[in-house]
Amino acid sequence: MNYHDKKFIPVKNSENGETSEETIFHYQQDGNILTCEYSGGKIKKGHLIGVVSSTGHIDMRYHQINIEGKLMTGICHSTPEILDNGKVRLYETWQWTSGDQSKGESILEEI
């Protein structure tokens, strides 16, 4: 699985998350190294870096500045699904490593 130059939006997120359908993730991939810039909604600017397994699973770390000016950090694990239309859906489990350190789940879909 290669995520290079793919864009995703969240279609579902836990209440304690900061992303929304207004947040756009733009993925870049070089070998098994994944990077991403994202923004929109409650996120002024965010970045992630991760490693993609041979099955397309992603182990990543992220940091972002929200619209309140707070720096937030976390870890995330994504499991891909290929949809009938050929687009990718990512099922994510994540945890804040800043703030309340709560956990959550989200779903991103390729646009």
Image (cartoon, rainbow, N blue to C red):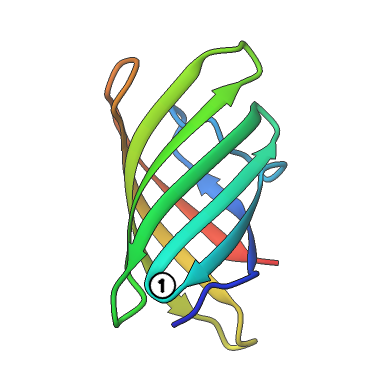
Q: Residue at x 30, y 81 (%)?
A: 55
Query: With 57 as the anchor, is 27 left or right in this view?
Result: right
State the residue lying farthest toward the front. Answer: 30
Locate residue 45, reporting x and y percent: 63, 32
Secondary structure beneath dot 1 equals: strand
> Which of the 4 quarters of the picture holds residue 69?
top right
Q: Is residue 4 left or right of residue 103?
A: right
Residue 84 vertical position relative to residue 48 in the rendered view, above or below = below
Question: Residue 87: horizontal and vertical position, in percent?
Answer: 61, 79
The residue tagged 1 is 80
Quadrant, the N terminus? bottom left
Q: Is residue 85 left or right of residue 98?
A: right
Residue in the picture at 46% in, 30% down = 15
**Mark 1: amino acid:** Pro
Q: Where is residue 101 drawn, in percent x and y?
A: 27, 23
At 40% from the left and 65% from the top, the residue drawn is 33
Vertical relation: 13 (above or below) 66: below
Q: Residues within 10 Å of mark 1 (few under 14, many from 20)?
A: some
Question: At 72% from the left edge and 41% from the top edge, which residue is drawn?
Answer: 22
Q: Point out residue 72 in the picture as x, y percentages from the top left corner.
A: 44, 23
Left or right, 64 with reference to 102:
right
Q: Quadrant of the C terminus?
A: bottom right
